Image (spheres, rainbow, N blue to C red):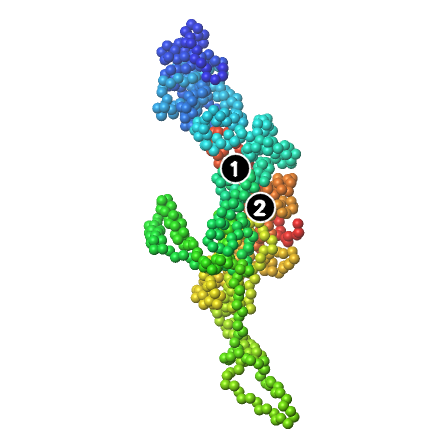
């Protein structure tokens, strides 16, 4: 008899042939009990709690280790729905074999403890009816073992569909979660699994698909696309979940893309865009399915921002999601002036600074800063930073010939680069007057040189030779030849003097570098030092958004703000810097001249070797500065042999063997996941002496929601993968890169 047995009409003692008829009769007459006949024994329902007082736990219960739902949670469930399964009990006999009126519970001890807890919490009356089954045949341990072993667990698909049925009947996700003591995230996962294509659910029910594969199909709600991917997998060598996700999200844009961050999910969805989400593993915000819509929304917002900037009075404004690295090379940068603070703003800033200093002083000796104080300090720091980041004002005449670049940075924020003047928009440069000769006060009118005379006109043979003219009172200009000789002497002496004064020599070199790197015309130096900052012939993906590029750009902007407008004033400004500032500026300028780019048409093995020495001197670590071996940046652009070598070196031979049979695109994607977090970089990016030893792959942790589900007794949606047994290392030598 399945379900709750209905209480039968009270039976009289004469109708009860069971040996416990006297007890049943007593229970029905004195305690208001009711009897129901079922297979295997009698089920007694007591109207009062006397029967509960007669129950004791049996030592014959085979379950010794606590597992599954805790007693407290089971008590909550019984309080919500009452006891759904009867207790199996056996009478306790005395030494003579007579009944003592007490019954032991060999099976269902956790339910009994939950009932006791409810009584203790005064949430269950002792007179409440408790269903029990009295058994006398067999062995108590056998009853307990059979009840636990023969009980078949619920298939996960049945649970998914049960949650879906509750949802269709009007239960909210929060109500379902509260009823079954799981998180709302777990309920959403179950509902998402139940929403997979019915055809695929049937395959899963027949064990034709793993739970991990079914979870991967939840990324896309398109049943037709799900079935197409499953059909394609039947002809594929591998059917890993990551491959299913990749096929379902093919052509979609990751939410971590800077265009997606710039537009925002709310605007994208309002325009009709669909975001695919993965509830079973971190997805960084999911996948934006309509790449064309996203690109259009990004350009439309950029154009709106550009229109607002055009209104400031600039000659031109260029807007694009991305510009190549070095797009401002050769353009003159305007130096605006930061707008001063008003009196109110100054007073506000001083008050915030005083409050910040006071809070820091109060917490100086404390072991731990209070949460409220820490939050307030962060707010003040943000406000002070806003005061320091003042808007810059430009001259209106300069703005009329300059322009602005508007783009999106790597974090999805709007990037505005104001004040760049193109060469064709520069004002005409007036011709410089000829340099006056040393020791002259008037320009020379003839081209004679020292020791030469102008031929006199022929006046006939009888004419006497003319007398040389008297020296003019004015001083004649020095001849070019003599001036060259004199300045050669001075140059040689200046070289010797400067060599004896390292500080001035350093200042002169810094002056020459800054003229070329911060000014369009750097002709105000006598040093024949000309720094070159090479452009990148091939634009690597995302080069402008790397941490190194952002750091160089920010540092250059800080120094640019300290440079004078006219290059003729640069020497005095640099002379006023302290030694530390000069060294920092010098290092920045020298850093801009490094060129360690491999170019097929310009092979420079000695220069590349020198770059290795510098990298070793500064302890360069490309993994630490943010480079990652992604499919786009490296793995998808090399041979399968190099992909496997990278995985073997970073993760071990066993990990490489697992992906050896994949196609190249799939292998690159799998290798990207394996190499994540290993700090592995290819040979051209390594500093001399840097080697990598393979590490044991980490055990995949269950998703956050699933961990909660298992802890609370629910059916986990994914089982943790056992740790890999491979611990061998496979170090490969660093060799020269051959053409792929």
Q: Please state which of the two labelled residues, at mark 2 or mark 1, is closer to the viewer.
A: 1
Q: Earlier in the sequence, mark 2 or mark 1?
A: 1
Q: Position of residue 523 (x, y in %)?
A: 53, 67
Residue at x-position 47% and y-position 55%: 313
- Secondary structure at badge 2 equals loop
In this view, the residue in front, 380 or 263, is: 263
Packing grade of label 1 (10 A; few <14, some 14-19, many >=20) is few
Packing grade of label 2 (10 A; few <14, some 14-19, many >=20) is some
The residue identified by callout 2 is 630
Q: Are marks 2 and 1 in contact (CB under 8 Å)?
A: no
The image's mark for residue 605 is none
- Secondary structure at badge 1 equals loop
State left or right for residue 455 relative to residue 381.
Answer: right
Residue at x-position 59% and y-position 42%: 669
- Vertical order, 537 against 77 (above or below): below
Residue at mark 2 to residue at mark 1: CA–CA distance? 31 Å
Residue 235 image-quadrant placement:
top right
Q: Position of residue 294 (x, y in %)?
A: 54, 42
State left or right for residue 539 relative to residue 128.
Answer: right
**Residue 94 in view, yes or no:** no
- Vertical order, 604 against 136 (above or below): below
The image's mark for residue 272 is 1
Q: Residue farthest to the top?
A: 14
């Amino acid at each position: 008899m399945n379900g709750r047995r209905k209480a039968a009409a009270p039976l009289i003692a004469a109708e009860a042939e069971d040996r416990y008829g006297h007890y049943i009769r007593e229970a029905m007459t004195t305690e208001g009990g009711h009897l129901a006949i079922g297979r295997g024994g009698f089920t007694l329902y007591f109207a009062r709690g006397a029967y509960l007082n007669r129950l004791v736990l049996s030592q014959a219960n085979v379950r010794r280790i606590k597992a599954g739902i805790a007693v407290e949670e089971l008590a909550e469930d019984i309080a919500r729905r009452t006891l759904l399964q009867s207790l199996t009990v056996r009478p306790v006999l005395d030494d003579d074999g007579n009944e003592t009126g007490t019954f032991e519970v060999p099976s269902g001890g956790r339910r009994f403890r939950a009932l006791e807890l409810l009584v203790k919490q005064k949430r269950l009356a002792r007179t409440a009816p408790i269903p029990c089954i009295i058994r006398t045949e067999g062995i108590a341990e056998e009853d307990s073992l059979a009840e636990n072993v023969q009980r078949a667990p619920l298939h996960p698909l049945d649970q998914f569909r049960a949650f879906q049925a509750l949802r269709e009947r009007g239960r909210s996700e929060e109500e379902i979660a509260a009823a079954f003591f799981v998180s709302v995230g777990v309920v959403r996962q179950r509902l998402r699994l139940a929403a997979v294509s019915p055809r695929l659910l049937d395959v899963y029910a027949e064990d034709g698909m793993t739970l991990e594969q079914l979870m991967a199909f939840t990324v896309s709600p398109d049943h037709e696309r799900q079935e197409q991917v499953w059909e394609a997998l039947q002809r594929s060598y591998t059917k890993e979940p990551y491959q299913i996700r990749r096929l379902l999200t093919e052509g979609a844009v990751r939410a971590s893309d800077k265009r997606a961050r710039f537009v925002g999910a709310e605007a994208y969805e309002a325009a009709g865009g669909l975001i695919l989400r993965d509830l079973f593993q971190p997805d960084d915000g999911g996948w934006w399915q309509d790449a064309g819509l996203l690109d259009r929304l990004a350009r439309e917002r950029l154009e709106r921002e550009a229109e607002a900037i055009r209104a400031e009075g600039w000659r031109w404004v260029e807007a694009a999601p991305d510009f190549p690295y070095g797009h401002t090379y050769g353009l003159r940068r305007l130096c605006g002036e930061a707008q001063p603070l008003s009196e109110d703003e100054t007073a506000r800033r001083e008050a915030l600074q005083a409050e910040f200093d006071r809070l820091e002083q109060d917490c100086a000796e404390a072991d731990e800063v209070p949460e409220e104080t820490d939050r307030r300090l962060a707010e003040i720091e943000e406000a002070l930073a806003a005061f320091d980041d003042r808007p810059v004002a430009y001259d209106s005449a300069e703005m009329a010939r300059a322009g602005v670049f508007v783009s999106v940075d790597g974090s999805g924020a709007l990037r505005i680069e104001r004040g760049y003047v193109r060469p064709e928009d520069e004002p005409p440069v007036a011709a410089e007057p000829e340099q006056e000769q040393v020791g002259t006060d008037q320009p020379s009118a003839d081209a004679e040189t020292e020791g030469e005379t102008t031929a006199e006109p022929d006046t006939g043979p009888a004419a006497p030779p003319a007398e040389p003219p008297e020296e003019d009172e004015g001083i004649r200009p020095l001849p070019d030849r003599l001036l060259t000789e004199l300045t050669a002497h001075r140059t040689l002496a200046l070289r010797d003097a400067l060599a004896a004064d390292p500080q001035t020599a350093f200042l002169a070199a810094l002056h020459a570098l800054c003229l070329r790197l911060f000014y369009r015309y750097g002709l105000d130096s006598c040093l024949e030092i000309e720094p070159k900052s090479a452009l990148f012939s091939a634009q690597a993906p995302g080069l402008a958004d790397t941490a190194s590029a952002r750091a160089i750009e920010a540092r250059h902007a800080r120094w640019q703000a300290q440079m004078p407008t006219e290059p003729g004033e640069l020497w005095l400004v640099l002379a006023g810097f302290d030694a530390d500032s000069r060294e920092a500026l010098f290092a920045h300028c020298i850093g801009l001249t490094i060129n360690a780019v491999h170019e097929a048409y310009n092979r420079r093995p000695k220069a590349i070797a020198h770059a290795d020495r510098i990298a070793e001197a500064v302890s360069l670590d490309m993994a630490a500065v943010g480079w990652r071996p992604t499919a786009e940046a490296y793995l998808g652009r090399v041979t399968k042999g190099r992909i496997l070598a990278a995985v073997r070196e970073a993760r071990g031979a066993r990990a490489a063997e697992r992906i050896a049979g994949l196609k190249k695109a799939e292998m690159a994607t799998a290798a990207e996941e394996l190499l994540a977090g290993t700090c592995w970089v290819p040979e051209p990016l390594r500093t001399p002496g840097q080697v990598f030893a393979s590490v044991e792959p980490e055990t995949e942790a269950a998703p956050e929601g699933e961990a909660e589900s298992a802890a609370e007794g629910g059916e986990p949606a994914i089982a943790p993968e056992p740790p890999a047994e491979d611990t061998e290392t496979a170090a490969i030598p660093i060799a020269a890169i051959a053409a792929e």
